[in-house]
Amino acid sequence: MSDDQPGFALPEEGQDTPLYEQMKAEIKARIERGEWPINFRIPSENELVEMLGVSRMTAHRALRELASEGVIVRVQGRGSFVAPKKRRANVSDVRNIAEEIAERGGQHSVEIVLMQAEVCDHDLADRLEVAAGTSAFHSVIVHKEDDLPIQLEDRFVHAELAPAYLDQDFRTITPNAYLSGIAPISRAEQFVEAVLPLPWECRLLAIARSEPCLLVRRRTWSGDRLVTSVRLLYPGSRYSLESSY
């Protein structure tokens, strides 16, 4: 917490209310009054324990529940921050995430984790509708909004339909935008489910292993040929998916 911030104290009233609920109410009140703006780093568990004399379990529960309610965002290795309004995406559209972020007034950036050619095993060949042994391109990219990871994109691409895929600079154009430009989408299928992330996914998204995530599995075709199969993983506390008909 910044040195120029006023001291943190629990309310005098409502002492019959559990301490963790009092802590939650005080944090919410400071956010609503504008004392703690969006992206402000709130006191850590250790700082709350020291300032308030509460147990670590009490502080942990208060912050955990505030994160699950979308009031704060917990970023591993960095701390807890006042959350922006939860980002929304229409699950019925195949949107460019960079455009979504720009529409919200945010800054899009990426971390390129993997870019390589691979040989399709039987499972991947079925997903891409090609013969086993066919070449495919594999990319793993973390998309960030204002430096906060909000989407992990794990994508396989039909190499014959996008031969220059690995030559692209995906810091300046997203895979979605590039592939839509060279192979316009004629059909798409996607499935959405709630999952717990794998350890390597937690590390890239800077989230706890217990953080529920939204997983979108999507395949897109151009004409009658399948172009790409992608897994899009969103931290549940930072994103919501919606649909309209």
Image: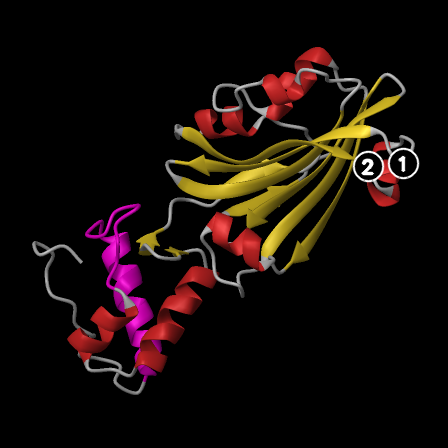
Return the x and y of residue 65 as percentages of the image width and height.
43, 68
Q: In the image as oriented, which residue stretches furthest toward the left?
A: 4
As rendered, which of 34 and 44 lies closer to the eye?
44
Q: Nearer the viewer, residue 232 or 189?
A: 232
* Callout count: 2
Q: Where 123 falls versus 159 (above or below)?
A: below
Magenta stretch? 17-43
Residue 25 shown in magenta? yes
Q: Which structural element holds mark 1? A: loop
Q: Which residue is mark 2?
A: 120
Other-residue count near label 1 (Cα within 10 Å), few / some / many at <14 / 14–19 / ≥20: some
Mark 1 touches mark 2? (CB < 8 Å): yes
Circle 2 — which element? loop
User: Residue 2: image x %, image y %?
Assistant: 14, 54
| Residue 13 to residue 217: above or below | below
Q: Amino acid at mark 1?
A: Ala
Label 2: few (<14), some or many (≥20) within 10 Å?
many
Which image quadrant is residue 114 in? top right
Q: CA distance from mark 1 to mark 2?
A: 5 Å
Residue identified by numbered label 1: 132
Give the residue at x 25% y 72%: 46
Magenta segment includes 149:
no
**Front in this rendered view, residue 60 or 198:** 198
